[in-house]
Amino acid sequence: MLVQRDGMWIMHYDPNISVPFASVNPIMAKAGEMAMWHAFKQIHIPMLIVRGGDSDLLSAATVAEMCKVNPYARSIEIHHVGHAPAFIKAEQIALAKEFFS
């Protein structure tokens, strides 16, 4: 997202967000993944997984597996969007409103 400051448009995010991940080794990553799948299976409330169709972080196969292992999960894919839809377009906001109503 962009914000305007002092008449200039600047990026509005933390550019160092990935720094903590640099120290993760393959063993730590696998253990973390296993823990996350276990935790995900324990969620027993309706969930809406919103995937950007052009995501390079969350694959369609992973979303399918998420919906398979947890019956409370359902998914929507927003085409021509990167990893995380911003929910600033009316059609995306409508999806969220429908889910939470």
Image (tube, helix red, strand yellow):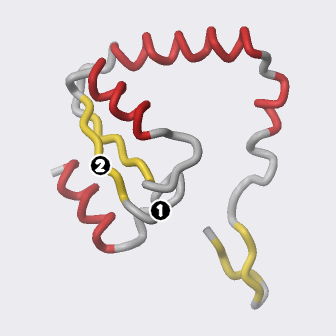
Amino acid on which disc 2 is placed: Ile
First in residue order: circle 1 vs circle 2:
2
Seen in the picture, residue 4 relative to 93 is either above or below; the reply is below
**Residue annotated with mark 1:** 81
Q: Quadrant of residue 21?
A: top right
Q: Residue furthest bottom?
A: 7
Query: In the image, is 89 to the left or to the right of 11?
Result: left
Q: Camera-side residue: 67 or 99?
A: 67
Q: Residue at x 35, y 41 (%)?
A: 49
Where residue 39 sits in the image (x, y, percent)? 43, 14
Q: Residue at x 21, y 23 (%)?
A: 71
Q: Residue at x 29, y 49 (%)?
A: 76
Seen in the picture, residue 5 relative to 68 is either above or below; the reply is below
Where residue 47 sits in the image (x, y, percent)? 28, 35
Q: Residue furthest front?
A: 61
In the drawing, what numbered circle is on residue 76?
2
Q: Residue at x 50, y 17 (%)?
A: 36
Q: Camera-side residue: 58 or 39?
A: 58
Q: Quadrant of residue 91?
A: bottom left
Amino acid on which disc 1 is placed: Val
Q: CA distance from mark 1 to mark 2?
A: 12 Å
Count residues near mark 1 (Cα–Cα under 10 Å), then give few for <14, some for 14-19, many for 20+. some
